[in-house]
Image (cartoon, helix red, strand yellow):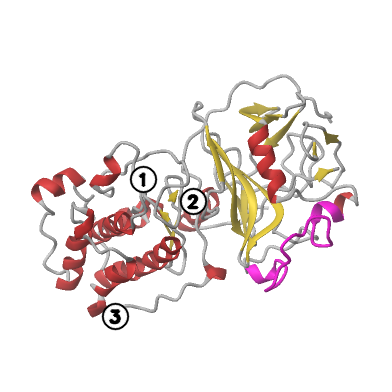
Amino acid sequence: MTQFILHYRAVRESEALHYIYQLADALKFIHQHQMNHLDIKPGNVLLDNNNNATLIDFGLSKRYDGEGHQTSTTPIGISAGYAPMEQYKQGGVSTFSPATDIYSLGATLYKLLTNETPPDASDVNDDGLPPLPPSISQSTADTIEKAMQPRRRDRPQSIDEFLSLLTNNNKPSMQYNEEESETTIIPSISPKAEEEPGSPNIPPKRANHLSNREIWFIAILILLVTSIFVINKTSYNVPAQNSDTAVAIENPIPNLPAQPIDLGLSVKWASWNVGASSPEDYGGLYGWADPTGNNTSTNNTDYPNNNPPSNICGTNYDIAHIKWGENWRLPTKNEVLELCEKCSWKWTSYKGSNGYMITGPSGNYIFLPAVGQRYGTNIGSQKNFGYYWSGTLYSTGYSNYLSFSNTQYQLSFTLRYLGCSVRPVSK
């Protein structure tokens, strides 16, 4: 959306409200799941070719329990002009508060209509908001002013309350469609890989022509689209790396079974990905429950249907099991979590591929390359991000998977139609 604003300057009010309603729809959903986004701004809004807005980048988001107490640990970050006063407190927002995201939503609407970065929260507290253009309707101006009140208790306390202030602007229905929704948790960053280490304890051994706007859309989508909730998260401060996004992967290398590596865990992990022939090879990017590896549909119901099984590990939907044989399968959610919790992870470069060298309790290790992710036939975020399926369904629209950047790795969940890597396991 930032690029859109730079190109078109201020947005017409009707168009701005169209985007805000869609963002409000996404916020209503995550607030219903006791979660704050905490970084709403135009830079974290994706516009597709049909002018639909998708809220992305949940890197600063927090989860809360039923009593509103924080249950997840994430980095503290501030986007000046979009973050309210409470986000500047030590420790950030420790209790669940839809009003915090509503401030940022109001600030985003301010930016859309004025093409001016909203004043910092401290300036709003001292001086109030600058006058809005007279062309903006009174109900919209009142909504922005109300949403950006310095005191949290003076703002709308829910998305429904926020939207009620816009009733004169033809508020659309707030029906949430899980199958069509997609959001993300990986922050946009710029890593720098370490020098290539010695060989690990593992066996050695299509691009579309797009317009500039489409390239931007696909790059940002694949870079950032991931899951909604962080189930497990460990962050590292490591040097930054040059970003390389929206790169097409060549046709997958023929499927050659790898060797099982005993990391000292409950299962043995393969030495390379499905579709690869060495640890540093990328392999293929597959939709969940697609045993053929050829499905590029962006419809969740094609993976495999409207009522997917809760666990496809070792079944006919498991591409690892089908391609490599009965001794191999997708890892379960718990086995991915075990890999996260019981192993040492080091971001590095191995034979020209960025990724994580993962050392298990046994002292053996595997390398997971940062292969990126596929949306339809377009691939991006290679070298900087990795996404690996588990065989465990999260809900009707989502499946659990491992996602990582150079600063964090986590068990999360995402839409089933996105193309992700597969690293099999074996008993």
For badge 3, the amino acid type reads: Asn
The spot of residue 149 in percent (x, y) is 18, 56
Query: What secondary structure do most residues of the magenta stretch adopt?
Result: loop
Camera-nearest residue between 248 and 163: 163
Name the element at disc 3: loop
Quadrant position of the C terminus in the picture: top right
Magenta includes 306? yes
Q: Is 273 situated above or below 297? A: above
- State which tag comes first along the sequence, 3 or 2: 3
Name the element at disc 2: helix
Q: Report the Cα–Cα distance between label 1 and label 2.
A: 29 Å
Q: Report the Cα–Cα distance between label 3 and label 2.
A: 30 Å
Among all residues in the image, which is located at the extreme right?
326
Return the residue at label 2. Answer: 220
Q: Is 66 situated above or below 123? A: below
Camera-nearest residue between 9 and 201: 201
Q: Mark number for residue 170? A: 3
Residue drawn 42% across the image and 47% down it: 70
At label 2, counting other C-alpha atoms closer than 10 Å, the crowd grade (few under 14, some 14-19, many 20 or more) is many
Residues drawn in magenta: 300-322
Nearer the viewer's eye, disc 1 or disc 2?
A: 1
Camera-nearest residue between 408 and 207: 408
Q: Report the Cα–Cα distance between label 3 and label 1.
A: 35 Å
The spot of residue 140 in percent (x, y) is 20, 69
Return the residue at label 1. Answer: 94
At label 3, counting other C-alpha atoms closer than 10 Å, the crowd grade (few under 14, some 14-19, many 20 or more) is few
At label 1, counting other C-alpha atoms closer than 10 Å, the crowd grade (few under 14, some 14-19, many 20 or more) is some
- State which tag comes first along the sequence, 3 or 1: 1
- State which tag comes first along the sequence, 1 or 2: 1
Among all residues in the image, which is located at the extreme front?
67
Left/right of residue 110 with respect to residue 403 in the rendered view: left
